[in-house]
Amino acid sequence: MRSLRTGWFKSLLAASLVAGAGLAATAAHAADLLDTVKQAGVLKIGLEGTYPPFGFRGAKNELEGFDVDVARAVAAKLGVKPEFVTTEWSGIIAGLQAGKFDVIVNQVNVTPQRQQVLDFSTPYVYSDAQLIQRKDDKRQFKSLEDLKGHKLGVSLGSNYNDLAKSVAGIEVKTYPGAPEYLRDLAAQRVDAALNDRLMVAYLVKTANLPLRPGAIVAGATTQVAIPFRKDNPKFAQAINHALEELGKDGTLGKLSVKWFGTDVTKPAGKPVK
């Protein structure tokens, strides 16, 4: 009986502590994120920092890239300083939910699953999925359907992993990142790889492997936006206004051309190969 009573008391105490913590968290969360950011004078931005050309360490070990430039421009529009927090992709969503940073600017695609737990800004990039093949491979895979019975390499946890698995008959092989599956593609361990078309040209150019861009996958257009924690309407309005102004004044378009050679910040009539 003593052990049961002790367990009951501990359970009651734990429940009280959880309830108290919940009330404290609710009170702390009452302030809109915009007020918190303005008061601090800093926008904390989560990104990998190892994902060129979006965010990576340059020759001087300083962060640079398309997303880094976009984040700095957004922070400037909000009237605060950007503070970058580098985080591995596998934990970046959890880091945002835990309050380690205010936003993620790291090519986060808008998906129904993510919208259930996070709010998103208006999109600032529109792209499509594209295949990668070996240069000496004469086969022309024009769609994911053509890859039935073949091996396809994708990054673990990426949207392209889910996309590849949506087509029955494809043997999907997952990898930590692009370098690993590109090496396996060149070594003929997989028949093709799948990534964002913004990345494909860069990957093929910098991998120093006998690879070539493949077909753009129809119907797989993605929208990239800036996620943040839910229930921050003032912040949502402010960040959307910042992106709208950056679009109108040409900043987003110029940054896109700088890093990709074309403007990917607006929906295209059809995929650009």
Image: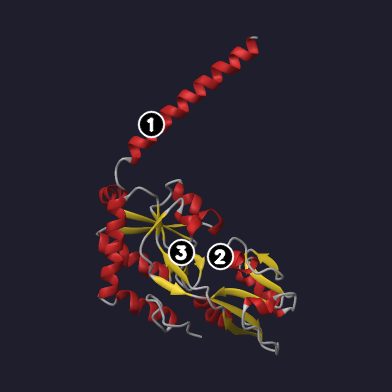
Residue 190: x %, y % from top left: 72, 75
> What is the number of the mark on residue 159?
2
Q: Is residue 117 left or right of residue 239?
A: right
Residue marked by disc 1: 23
Q: Secondary structure at mark 1?
A: helix
Contact flag, marks 3 and 1 (Cβ < 8 Å) = no
Comes first in the chain, label 1 or label 2: 1
Q: Quadrant of the N terminus?
A: top right
Residue 135: x %, y % from top left: 66, 88
Position of 167 relative to 237 (above/below): below
Indicate the quadrant where residue 138 lies. bottom right
Q: Secondary structure at mark 2?
A: helix
- How is the model colour-coded? secondary structure
Indicate the quadrant where residue 7 lies. top right
Q: Nearer the viewer, residue 156 or 45?
A: 156
Q: Nearer the viewer, mark 3 or mark 1?
A: 1
> What is the number of the mark on residue 106?
3
Could you give the CA–CA distance between mark 1 and mark 2, rounded to whole angstroms? 36 Å
Is residue 56 something that shows in the picture?
yes
